[in-house]
Amino acid sequence: MRFQLLGPLALADGPDVVVLQPSKPVILLAALLLHANSTVSADYLQRAVWGEDQPATARAALQTCVLRLRRLFTKHGVTGTSIEAVPGGYRITAGPPTLDLLGFRDQVRRATALVRDPEAELYTLKDALSLWQGSLLANVRSDVLHRDEVPRLSEERLRAVERVCDLLLGLGRCGEALVDLWTATRVYPGHERFHEQLIEALYRTGRQSQALAEYRRVKGFLLDELGVDPSPSLRQLELSILRGEDLGAGGAVRAAVEPAPAPASAPAPAPVPGPMSRVIQGAAVSLPAAAPGAGRVPAVPHFTGREVEAAAMAARLTAPPPPGADGQRPLTVLVSGAPGIGKSALAQHVAHLVRDSFPAGRLLVRMTRADGHPRTADEVAAEVGAALGPGRAGERALLVLDDVVDADQVRPLLTPPDLAVVVTSRMGLGGLIATHGGWVHRLTAFTEAESYALLLAALGTERVEAEPHEARQLAALCGHFPAALRILTARLLTRPGLRLGDAVDWLGDDPLARLTLTDSPDHSVSGLFDRALGRLDPRLSEAFLRIGAGPPELLGETDIADGPEGPDGTKDHPPVPEDVLEQLADAGLLEDGPPGPYRIHDLLRAHLRRTVRIRNRRTEKV
């Protein structure tokens, strides 16, 4: 039996993988595995499971949690690994064959020893990266672990990816490096080394104009979003390209003979405890700084479509207050709709359109954590206050509150009169509109024209106009769903030689499987829908799976009670209560008809049916 940490926490027995359901024993298991072979203090485990505000009975509850975890091991046949109670806490023993995290670190360490054999080092690092299986600890609902551990693990992966690209460039395999670098630069736009590698690879494959265009794009991003200039190495690279110098493998070869530091398999010597330290195994371990939740509104590359909605939002945000209002607002605009429908992109695009009307600043505030849990209103209010400062009288500010979970997160922020707020949410938030007013824009899938325009903007006119019919077929296979189109264009950009006609056949074989970024599996249509289902109440999620796997009549206006009976005289598909349908519609998972009052997007229905089939097969195996 093998534990998988580099993705959703799972148990693997050969080809069979069981992804564990979110629970407190699963949090406990993750905390132990992250520090395998070391004693983890009871205090740290309690914080990981219950957070900073622990119940008075946390220590006794931890013992119960350990007991439940041991029962979980028995249930899944985990016999070679045990949880030991030791002085000061608990310990779990694992090695590279039984824990993928240790396997990854072991392979990286082996690769470092192969520094004088670049081909062997490259092969070993790619083998290590193949152990990553998706979004880190997606099913582990612990703010402490996502704050303290996930950033550190992500950094280990980024160092390995960067090293792989250095080796590919050093070996002269620039075309192969481009495949990884196109995606890496888009997923991590602030990582300058990836941009430097991409520009070098483009130049060395004879694409000088594209390399310079990429440099200008990166320079604009750094200045507009971060307020900094490109690094000296990036500026030197641009100068070398302008001079037409032969880079050869010089820069990459130098990088390829300097091994990247390997992550330690055990904690480093502990620093003196400070305000940003936490005790594990009785020693102080520094914590990575938490990413800020409020920052400047980033630009949206290749934004297309939504012209009517964008114009209406811009007009409402910049309109003068009505007579007699004495400027007492904030004005609220709500953008709602399904996950991946383009709410955040529209809100950020509009924020740039109206920037001149908000001299006090424009802030993007993430309202959920990486694990999908909502942030508190007090936490967000303190962040916003610190970011905006006192301001000047009469100057307005714009807040974009992204991915709001419920109205209570927003209400405390709607008090300053010189504030306008754009809220994006999967939820309808009818209660917020009822108490505070505002305008609502509920987004649906793109039109055919909007989808085609996105392909033109992202892939270029030359490539799309050469095969316009095939481009429209690709948009149709994506269901004109913005997130699916974005993932498709990212994949096609990394394969510039692939004809769109061939891509139609490739995508049509299995759209759900193909609409994913291979080196970043959490960027996928299936992952997007899985995370949306994970936010639902379990009973509501089960009802939605039944609706999606059932016939379309479950969403129609006909009376299901008059439908066909099964062989035992019962109804094959019992009716779905109206309140369940309304809750699913409010969560953005059901669209307005036709036919009938509700409808499920085709991609989402296909995902639900696949999920049910996989679950049924697992049940049959058991």
Image: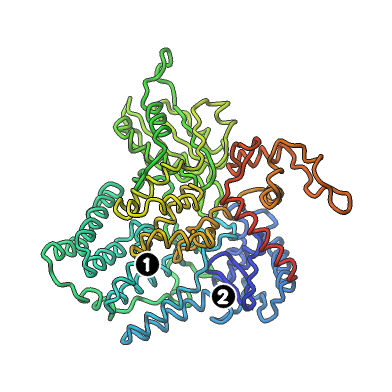
Q: How many marks?
A: 2
Which residue is painted at 44% across and 35% down in the image?
Answer: 422
Q: Amino acid at mark 2?
A: Ala
Residue neighbourhood size for the residue with mark 2, other residues' Cα within 10 Å, grouped as few (<14), some (14–19), many (≥20): many
Q: Position of residue 47 (x, y in %)?
A: 59, 59
Q: On the picture, is 69 further left or further right than 324?
A: right
Front residue of this view, candidates 581 and 128: 581
Q: Amino acid at mark 1?
A: Asp
Colouring mode (rainbow / by chain / secondary structure / one colour): rainbow
Circle on res. 58: none
Which residue is painted at 63% across and 66% down in the image?
Answer: 19
Q: On the picture, is 253 further left or further right than 479?
A: left
Quarter of the view holding residue 321: top left
Q: Is residue 128 above or below residue 30?
A: below
- Label 2, on which residue? 36
- Label 1, on which residue? 180
Residue neighbourhood size for the residue with mark 1, other residues' Cα within 10 Å, grouped as few (<14), some (14–19), many (≥20): many
Q: Is residue 461 above or below residue 152?
A: above
Q: Position of residue 285 (x, y in %)?
A: 47, 67
Front residue of this view, candidates 251 and 227: 251
Q: Position of residue 391 (x, y in %)?
A: 33, 32
Cα gap from disc 2 to disc 1, whole angstroms: 31 Å
Q: Secondary structure at mark 1?
A: helix
